[in-house]
Image (spheres, rainbow, N blue to C red):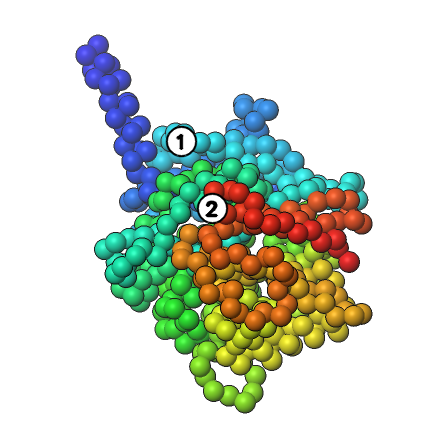
Amino acid sequence: MKKIIFFLMLLPIWAFSQQSLLENGPMLGYLTMHEVMFWVQTKKSAKVQVAYYPVDNPRQVYWTDAVQTTEDLAYTAHLVGNHLEPGTKYHYDVYINGKKLHFNYPTEFTSKVIWKYRTDPPDFSFATGSGTYINDPKWDRPGKPYGGGYEIYQSIYKKHPNFMIWLGDNVYLRQNEWNSWTGIVYRYTHDRKLPQLQPLLASVHHYAIWDDHDFGPNDSDGSFPFKNLTLKAFKAFWANPSYGLPGVPGAITYFNWGDVDFFLLDNRYYRDPDHMKTNGYKTQLGKAQLDWLKKALVFSKASFKVVVMGGQFLNTAGVYETYTNFGFDKERQDIIDWIYQQDIKNVVFLTGDRHNTELSILKRKGRPTIYDITISPFNSRPNVHAVNEKNTLRVPGTLVTQRNFAIIKFVGPLKQRKMVITVYDKDGKELWTREYMRE
C-alpha cells in the first residue's frame, strides 16, 4: 500500500517534468484540407507526439507519428496530422514522453472547406507584418532598446485571423550569432519564448519568408558564406509546406487559401550585392526563381495572386531596401512587363523590411493594376523618416511610421471578390482601411 501511495505522489512530479521539457511551442504550421503541421521544440532529446480530434466528436482521436527530437535540429519536431476532414474544427494536445501537456490558452484549428464547383469561396483573413526584435541586453547594441511593444502579438491574436504570414526579419541575428549554428539556434530559441507570442503561435497557422536579419548580417546577399546554416535553422523553426524548388534551394514556397494563391519568395539567397557595380542586369531572385514565379503567375487561376517578398517592390523613391535602388530596377521592370504582357490581373505584392507601412499602386491605362502592401514593423524600431521619401505610387493616407500590423481579408462572391486591407497599431486600434475589387 505504501508503494502505491508513493507512486501516486510521484505522478504530478512526473507530469510536471514532461511539461518542463517543453522549450517552445506548440505552433501551427501549414494547413491543407487533409493535413496540418504541428511544431514543437524541446529542451533536450524527447519523444513528441500530437493527438487531435474533432471538437464535436472527442472520441475520434488521431495521432501523429512520434518524433524523437535531436540536437542536430535544435530539438525541434515537425509533426504531420494527416487525417483531417475538410471544414472541421479540431482540438489538439501535445505529448512529451507520453505525457500530455497543459496550456492556459486554446489549442484548436479549423480545416479548410471544399468550395470549388459547390459554393462561392469562403471569406477569410490573415495577419501580416515584418520586423520582430526581441530585446536581449547581453547581446544588444548599447543605448535605447531596439525592440519593444510586445503587446502587438496579443493584439494580433485577438483579431483571430485564419493564418499569419511573417514578412521577414522575424528574428534579428546579432553579430555574435550569424556565423555559427550555436548562435543561430540560440537566437531563434530565445525569441520564440516571448510570452505574448504563445497564444498566437498555438491557434493560428503560420507561414514565413525571411529577409536579411534572419538570413545573415544587415543587407546580406548571396555571397553570405553561412547561408546554408541559416536556411537549416529557418527550416527547423518554421513549418512551411515546402522549401525551395527542385534543384533550387532557398526559403521559397507556395500555398493556396480559398480563391487566393500565395507565392513566397527568397530575395536573399541568390541576391547580387547591393553595391556591386554593373551596367547589366542585377538580380534579387536569381534566374531559376524568377522563371518559376513568372510561369506560376501565368498558370494561376486565383482571384488574387499574392507575391510575398522582403523589400518593397513598387516604391519609386530608390532608397534603402526598395527594388528601385542599387541597380535592381531592371529586374523590377522585367516583372512588371511580364505581368502586362501576359495580362495577369490582381497581382498583389506583400512586402516588409522598411520599418514603415504604406500602400503603393501602379495603374496604367489598359494594363492590370499592381498593388504593393508594405507592412512594418511589428515591434522593432519604426522608420519615422519615411515621410520624406518621394514614393510617387504611395496611396495618400496609408503611410504609418509606428509599430503596426495588418489584417487582410478576402470577402464576397467569386465574381465580386474583394480585398480589404486594414492596418492597426500595436494595441489593435484601426489606423486605416482600403478596399479593392478584383479586376
Dot 2: element: loop
**Residue shown at 66% from the left, 64% from the top:** 361
Residue 312 position within the rendered picture, expressed as x and y whole percent measured from the top left: 55, 66
Split into 4 quadrants, where in the image is the C terminus?
Answer: bottom right
Q: Along the polypeptide, which appears first: circle 2 or circle 1?
A: 1
**Residue shown at 70% from the left, 73% from the top:** 338
Where 119 sits versus 217, above or below?
A: above
Residues tagged 2 and 1 counted as in contact (Cβ below 8 A):
no
User: Dot 2: within a 10 Å radius of its alpha carbon, few (fewer than 14), some, or many (20 or more) residues?
Assistant: many
* Residue picked out by circle 1: 103
Measure how far apart labels 2 and 1 are at the Cα level: 25 Å
Where 113 sits versus 374, above or below?
A: above
> Can residue 72 be seen in the rendering of this structure?
no
> Can residue 165 be seen in the rendering of this structure?
yes
**Residue shown at 54% from the left, 24% from the top:** 58
Split into 4 quadrants, where in the image is the N terminus?
Answer: top left
Residue 355 position within the rendered picture, expressed as x and y whole percent measured from the top left: 46, 60
Amino acid type for the residue under numbered disc 2: Lys
Amino acid type for the residue under numbered disc 1: Phe
* Residue picked out by circle 2: 426
> Observer-nearest residue: 261 or 229?
261
Residue 193 position within the rendered picture, expressed as x and y whole percent measured from the top left: 35, 45
Where 304 sits versus 366, above or below?
A: above
Dot 1: element: loop
